[in-house]
Image (cartoon, rainbow, N blue to C red):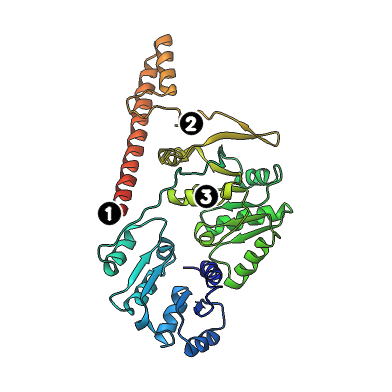
Amino acid sequence: PSRELANQIYAVAQQLIQTEPAIRINRLVGGMDKQKQIDKLQNHQPHVAIGTPGRILDMIKGYDLVPSSVRHFVVDEADMTLDMGFLETVDAIASSFPDHLQMAVFSATIPQKLEPFLRKYMDNPTTIELKPQSVIADTVENILIAAKGRDKNELIYQLVTMGHPFLVLIFANTKTSVDAIHDFLKHQGLKVAKIHGGIQPRERRRVMKDVADLKYQYVVATDLAARGIDIKGVSMVINAEIPRDNEFFIHRVGRTGRNGMAGTAVTLYEPGQEDQIAELEHMGIKFAPKMIKNGELVDTYDRNRRVHRKPKQEDTSLAIRGLVKKAKQKHMPNYRKKIRTAVLLERKRNTKIARRQALLAEKRKNRKRG
């Protein structure tokens, strides 16, 4: 789905055929000389074609790439392909191929909107699900910081200038947020790069080369723009915002702590996002609650966190027990009303979490069946 990912796969493929130079591999992506790609195809059809959906379809429509000879078809990062709006293009490509071919689809998740495409082209496929031993690598220190209405840009600045991180990757949910964080850090005198869908391909290639050459120590990005981009040596990941999709959280944090190296992941959250934190905890993700004090990260205990509460809906929280104790001491009728309200809110919140967890579990079950 992206030029960067296609270039990565092409580079690895070139390494694999070093001892077999007779194997022809063509790279078909936008942003490169199209006529040169056409000339190369007209001279010799490739054994392997690696490319982005738009350019591959162009070559098929122009009769430059011969689809009738295709025996294997691979769709990488299928969920990202769907998110970026390329699924119709991939559908058009697949429909041009012979009926009897091997098809492989690789995807971090299997969204429901992807399933009709899979049913259309895959007859009773074999599903292989790769499960990591743990949700987050043991090499990652996973930190949770309550923003509590404070300026997140200022918190991020404090985090990235604390100690000497080798390379910091900061995630935000939207292009607007990425721009805001980038501009703030740049204004503070930091050399920071940004990556999102609104940046022109040529500029994005230049930025990625500069990041690889260690010209930037800080990179701000959206999830989709960062997918498929191999940024090596990330020592810290900062979630400026909790992602809308929990799977994206795992992808983000997985950017650091690789190859046995230690890494740090920091998530900033607001009091109203407790339910989202609880969902991540239900997935087996553990957080270390901390706060910034005197320019250092220190342990803290946030009373609003749900990790120390028992999961049963009937359990009484510390806040409710406190109200009960006060009611007994003062015998004030108003406290009974407060207790009832607190209990109802507690039950409502637990019910909401339970429903969302059941829905997520059902979605995962459907993905496995698909």
Q: Earlier in the sequence, mark 1 or mark 2?
A: 2
Q: What's the amino acid at mark 3?
A: Gly
Q: Position of residue 218 (x, y in %)?
A: 66, 54
Task: Look at 55% across and 34% down and name the residue there.
Answer: 289
Q: Position of residue 333 (x, y in %)?
A: 36, 15
Which residue in the protein does label 1 denote?
369
Q: Badge 3 local density, few (<14 within 10 Å), some, or many (20+)?
A: some
Q: Is residue 150 left or right of residue 92?
A: right
Which residue in the protein does label 2 denote?
304
Spatial CA span between label 3 and label 1: 26 Å
Q: Is residue 340 left or right of residue 325?
A: left
Residue 159: which quarter of the image? top right
Q: Earlier in the sequence, mark 3 or mark 1?
A: 3
- Badge 2 element: loop
Q: Which mark is residue 254?
A: 3
Spatial CA span between label 2 and label 3: 26 Å
Residue 12: which quarter of the image? bottom right
Q: What's the amino acid at mark 1?
A: Arg
